[in-house]
Amino acid sequence: GNSVTQMEGPVTLSEEAFLTINCTYTATGYPSLFWYVQYPGEGLQLLLKATKADDKGSNKGFEATYRKETTSFHLEKGSVQVSDSAVYFCALANSNSGYALNFGKGTSLLVTP
Amino acid sequence: GAVVSQHPSWVICKSGTSVKIECRSLDFQATTMFWYRQFPKQSLMLMATSNEGSKATYEQGVEKDKFLINHASLTLSTLTVTSAHPEDSSFYICSARWPERNEQFFGPGTRLTVL
């Protein structure tokens, strides 16, 4: 079946630090991969996505590359801001599961000034 | 981006009563909607997949007679928690799939508290 594993949090960084949140997946076929962000008190928002191997998704300075050989989709940002404090979820969707999203457990990020 | 609304945003009810939660896609037609449940500080767990005009598909361990799902139109799906109990207290989130964009859009969630 499909599953997503992401690094446990919480992660605490100083402003302008480099961020990496690891995500690996198990899936049959050719899944699409996503990063969602949940800001305090708000609903989930799509941060970025990639639909095939070697695709790079990017948005708001965040990037993630779909690596089929390592079944990974790690999230990176070169310089985090206090406003990036949120919970980040890695997810995958597959046609064989009706495109329902399988989420990782989420990683809480706190950026301090 | 596309907008998905949920109503109500929060509800408190007595044990044994039923609660209906609505999920609407406001600016696109969603042939498929999904219902998730999120416990505090945990991930979203898929409860069921709802296809317009057909019966919902429930995940293992989710009681279909307790969590009634109706997807009567391309823009509306409802989740009814029947005979709610305190252990049903949770954050319920819907999403709607926009097939042309191969993307899901999430509602803001409904906080259910059963006393």
Image (cartoon, coloured by chain):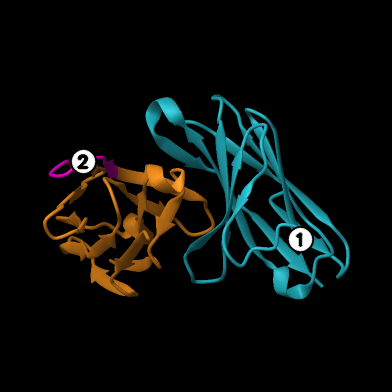
- Quick check: do tags 2 and 1 share a chain? no
Quarter placement of the N terminus of chain B: top left
Residue B28, x across and y down, in percent: 54, 25
Residue in the foreground of this view, choosing between B97 and A12: B97
Q: Is residue A41 visible?
A: yes
Residue bearing mark 1: B66
The local crowd at label 1, few if under 14, some if 14 to 19, many if 20 or more residues have their Cα within 10 Å, is some
Amino acid type at image mark 1: Lys
Looking at the image, residue A94 sits to the left or right of residue B57; the answer is left
Q: For the point 28% across and 48% down, which residue is it? A: A29
CA separation in Å, label 2 and label 1 = 38 Å
Estimate the x, y position of residue B111 in percent, counting from the top left.
67, 59
Q: Residue at x 15, y 52 (%)?
A: A68
Image quarter hosting the C terminus of chain B: bottom right
Residue A98 forms part of the magenta stretch: no
User: Which residue is depicted at the point 81% across and 59% down?
Assistant: B82
Figure chain in cyan: B
**Contact flag, marks 2 and 1 (Cβ < 8 Å):** no
Task: Identify which amino acid the numbered label 2 is placed on.
Answer: Lys
> In the image shown, does A61 or A58 lie closer to the viewer?
A58
The residue that label 2 is drawn on is: A52
Taking depth in this image into account, of A96 and A71 the one nearest to the observer is A96
Residue B108, placed above or below residue B30: below
Residue stretch rendered in magenta on the structure: A49-55
Q: What percent of the width, then of the height, locates residue B35?
A: 59, 51
Task: Give the structural element (helix, strand or loop) at label 2.
Answer: loop
Quarter holding residue B89:
bottom right
**Chain identity of mark 2:** A
Give the chain ID for the orange colour. A
